[in-house]
Image: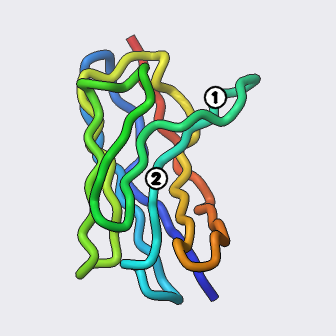
Amino acid sequence: QVQFVESGGGSVHLGGSLRLSCVGSGSVFERYDAGWYRQAPGSQREMVGTISSVGIPSYGNSVKGRFTISRDNAKRSVYLEMNNLTPEDTAVYYCHGRNIDTSREYWGQGTQVTVSV
């Protein structure tokens, strides 16, 4: 069974930093594009950052220059380094994986990030 499990959420003040981690299991991690999405109350889920199976990153406009996505295939992990956080970054953050061979998609259970002034 393929699973993606997030960790690292929490509460920080304006301008703070957090690092989210996501570990994949149950399949060959290198065969997955991975990414982070977030959803705030009353809002649609939005893309934060994605990283292809070969390590090419892309970012949502609202986080460019502040967030960095990376992956370590040996650790079956994808990371999201978040800096200069603002209250607008408050949301549940979800890890996402898409198998590049089958296009099947998987979501983690989510981790809460709360930024206060």
Is 34 rendered above or below residue 91?
below
- Indicate the quadrant where residue 46 lies: top right
**Which residue in the structure is indicated by mark 1?**
40
The residue carrying pointer 2 sits among few (fewer than 14), some (14 to 19) or many (20 or more) residues within 10 Å by Cα, namely: many
Is 107 rendered above or below residue 82?
below
Residue 95 x/y as whole percent: 51, 56
Q: Can you tell which of label 1 and label 2 is closer to the viewer?
A: 2
Residue at image point 47% right, 48% down: 36
CB atoms of marks 1 and 2 within 8 Å: no
- Choose between 14 and 60: the one closer to the eye: 60
**Hey, what amino acid is under mark 1?**
Ala
Residue at image point 63% right, 78% down: 102
SS label for mark 2: strand
In the picture, measured across the screen, residue 90 lies left or right of residue 2, that is: left
Residue 22 x/y as whole percent: 41, 63
Farthest right residue in view? 42
- Choose between 4 and 64: the one closer to the eye: 64
Rendered-image quadrant of the C terminus: top left
In the picture, measured across the screen, residue 116 lies left or right of residue 68, that is: right
In the picture, measured across the screen, residue 21 lies left or right of residue 87, that is: left
**Which residue in the structure is indicated by mark 2?**
35
Residue 33 x/y as whole percent: 45, 63
**Hey, what amino acid is under mark 2?**
Gly
Residue at image point 24% right, 69% down: 72
SS label for mark 1: loop
Rendered-image quadrant of the N terminus: bottom right
The residue carrying pointer 1 sits among few (fewer than 14), some (14 to 19) or many (20 or more) residues within 10 Å by Cα, namely: some
- Of the two numbered discs 1 and 2 on the same chain, state the one appearing first in sequence: 2
